[in-house]
């Protein structure tokens, strides 16, 4: 997907502000060039009724410089934030074209690209072809396995992240849509704010959330990072989970 196709599908960001030259320079070489071009033309703002916000890496660089310094195989400077949800999930782009996500409230870092690249072929792959009105190729499995290594598409990531339907399908533990409740109880978000869940809360209910600035939420990120990634073992996907103490050892 191209930036033009994204723009056609989602429109310009709402309540957009210009991106400063300093922010541009800090993102140079860390995000795809067409993302920076999009910023220059359209600025950064929100989508999906203020449930997703575009951002520059500078907003979270300080947090990740500290929190992710001891994650094996990763360098914080290779990760660049480009957007975040109202619930504090940050999308990160790796210099190598990989997609990570970090959840502020539970300090969960997920290597999403590793999951895509180790995913097993669907058991109903033939049926998926037929339901799309396509003939099933003889090498359907081989084609699927080959497709896993394609580079990530940052515009497709953003298209999915900015879908209003995504946030309508987030429910609390009582089965009620969460984000409308948060908006009613805590008010709408401004730029650099999120709804932050109390880390000690057992149940996922609206009363356990606060509206915080990014700086305030970052200060509450737990000092243990939970790092989740996938590997392939004998043709099957294996999820690895590690706990990294910030400023310490595993």
Image (cartoon, rainbow, N blue to C red):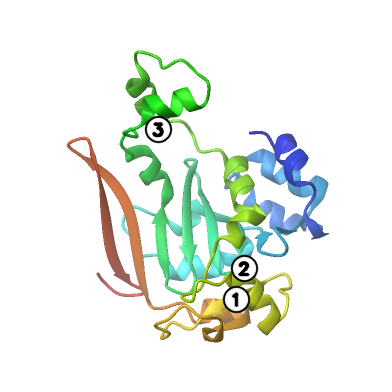
Tell me which residue sits at (70%, 80%) in the image: 184
On the image, the x and y values in percent for residue 190 come to 74, 73
Question: Label for residue 86?
Answer: 2
Res 62 quadrant in image: bottom right
Q: Is residue 208 above or below residue 149?
A: below
Q: Circle 2 — which element? A: loop
Tell me which residue sits at (63%, 81%) in the image: 211
Residue 26 shows in the view:
no
Q: Is residue 62 above or below residue 112?
A: below
Position of the N terminus, as image quadrant, is: top right
Mark with earlier residue (3, 2): 2
On the image, the x and y values in percent for residue 66 come to 45, 70
Mark 1, Cα crowd under 10 Å, few <14 / some 14-19 / many 20+, is many
Mark 2, Cα crowd under 10 Å, few <14 / some 14-19 / many 20+, is many
Tell me which residue sits at (63%, 77%) in the image: 182
The front one of 71 and 217 is 217
**4 lies left or right of 87:** right
Mark 3, Cα crowd under 10 Å, few <14 / some 14-19 / many 20+, is some
Residue 170 shows in the view:
yes
Question: Label for residue 195?
Answer: 1
Q: Residue furthest left?
A: 234
Q: Is residue 128 above or below residue 109?
A: above
Tell me which residue sits at (66%, 72%) in the image: 180
**157 lies left or right of 141:** right
Q: Circle 3 — which element? A: loop
Question: Label for residue 148?
Answer: 3
- Do tag 2 and tag 1 residues touch (Cβ < 8 Å)? yes
**Residues at marks 2 and 1, CA–CA distance in whole angstroms:** 6 Å
């Amino acid at each position: 997907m191209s930036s033009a196709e994204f723009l056609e599908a989602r429109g310009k960001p709402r309540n957009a502000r210009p991106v400063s030259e300093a922010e541009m320079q800090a993102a140079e070489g860390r995000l795809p060039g067409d993302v920076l071009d999009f910023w220059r033309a359209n600025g950064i703002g929100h989508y999906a009724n203020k449930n997703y916000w575009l951002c520059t890496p500078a907003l979270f660089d300080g947090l990740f410089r500290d929190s992710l310094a001891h994650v094996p195989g990763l360098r914080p400077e290779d990760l660049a934030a480009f957007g975040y949800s109202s619930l504090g999930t940050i999308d990160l782009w790796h210099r190598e074209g990989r997609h990570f996500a970090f959840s502020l409230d539970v300090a969960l870092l997920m290597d999403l690209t590793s999951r895509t690249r180790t995913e097993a072929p669907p058991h109903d792959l033939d049926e998926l072809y037929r339901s799309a009105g396509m003939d099933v190729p003889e090498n359907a499995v081989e084609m699927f396995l080959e497709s896993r290594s394609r580079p990530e598409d940052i515009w497709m990531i953003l298209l999915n992240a900015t879908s209003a339907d995504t946030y309508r399908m987030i429910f609390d533990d009582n089965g009620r849509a969460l984000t409308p409740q948060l908006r009613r109880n805590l008010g709408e978000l401004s730029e650099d704010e999120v709804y932050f869940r109390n880390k000690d809360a057992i149940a996922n209910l609206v009363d356990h959330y606060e509206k915080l600035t990014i700086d305030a939420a970052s200060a509450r990120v737990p000092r243990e990072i939970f790092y989740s990634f996938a590997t392939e073992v004998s043709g099957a996907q294996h999820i690895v989970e590690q706990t990294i103490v910030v400023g310490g050892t595993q």
